[in-house]
Amino acid sequence: MSDLSRLRIWDIWVRLFHWSFAASVVFLLFSGETGIGFFDWHRWAGEFVLLLVLFRLFWGFLGSSNARLVPLLRHPVAALNHLRGLLAGERHDERGHNSAGGWAVLAMLLLVLVQAVTGLFIADEEELIEGAFYYDVSSGVNEFFYRIHHTNAELLQILVVIHVLMVLAYLIRTGQNLILPMLTGRMKWSSDKTPPAVVFAKPWLGLFFLGVCYLLLAWLLRWPPLF
Ligand code: HEM
Ligand code: HEM
């Protein structure tokens, strides 16, 4: 009989992904908005985030069952009902993302992907840093992607703030601490219902996918020392 007070939820790769992704995105938004650390690190952090998103897509199709991305597309009514329950202070233990959180996860991955891809085609005004494909496209395309990079950054900031506020809302309204499981990989299961089964992928598979994503991007973006 497993210890239900310390039920396994997030595998090591979801947790490593989350905290490195969160730290990099916060740095990128900060450096983009303030210029601090921008010329030294913005491009490299942006390409690193692209690696993370690519990895998460692999993990979202071939990783642990509760990290899968397609099942996160739940019916919007279910998501709204979940949020209504949250407002009312109802607690629903989940061994994965809930129906509203799933949409937020997909939106965050999508916006960061758009941000990183548009970054590849733009440069700052003095052309001190250029994206890997800046010179491969016309100035009209540069300008178009620059505008998306600018506007999408605003949307992303709003989404990140909502994300953190929602995590705090669970803590305050329902007493559910979602942060600890994202750190330790284990959660407290307090519902009477039997917890759903989760199939955890072998940890070495994550290392393999990360290697594949690294080689793919190293080739595409000509990362030294390999290319
Ligand atoms: C692929 C790598 C990336 C490259 C090469 C890149 C490059 C650039 C450049 C050249 C600028 C314009 C700076 C200026 O106006 O002088 C910029 C702005 C910015 N970038 Fe990136 N970026 C990348 C990825 C990202 C990512 C992933 C994020 C966030 C998750 C991000 C967030 C921002 C923000 C917030 C700004 C300021 C936008 C504005 O207010 O105009 N960038 N980036
Ligand atoms: C201090 C800041 C943050 C905290 C406390 C936090 C906390 C969390 C928690 C608890 C979850 C799991 C939610 C659940 O149980 O369903 C989560 C998921 C997630 N968060 Fe954050 N987060 C933070 C910052 C960020 C930032 C800056 C981003 C960047 C966009 C981000 C992106 C994500 C993503 C993509 C997931 C889904 C993880 C996955 O399935 O791989 N988080 N976060």
Image (tube, rainbow, N blue to C red):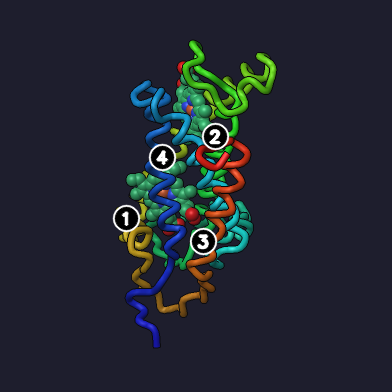
**Callout 2: CB less than 8 Å from ligand 1:** yes
Characterize the local packing of mark 4: few (<14), some (14-19) or many (20 or more) Cα atoms within 10 angstroms: some
Residue 35 image-quadrant placement: top left
**Callout 1: CB less than 8 Å from ligand 2:** no
Q: Which residue is located at x 54 percent, y 57 percent?
A: 99
**Callout 4: CB less than 8 Å from ligand 1:** yes
Q: Is residue 95 above or below residue 74?
A: below
Q: Nearer the viewer, mark 1 or mark 3?
A: 3
Query: Looking at the figure, which quarter contains the N terminus?
Result: bottom left
Along the line of sight, which residue is nearer the eye, 55 or 72? 55
Amino acid type at mark 2 = Ala
Between the C-alphas of marks 4 and 3, the distance is 20 Å
Q: Which residue is mark 4?
A: 24
> Which numbered tag is attached to residue 206?
3
Q: Secondary structure at mark 1?
A: helix
Characterize the local packing of mark 3: few (<14), some (14-19) or many (20 or more) Cα atoms within 10 angstroms: many
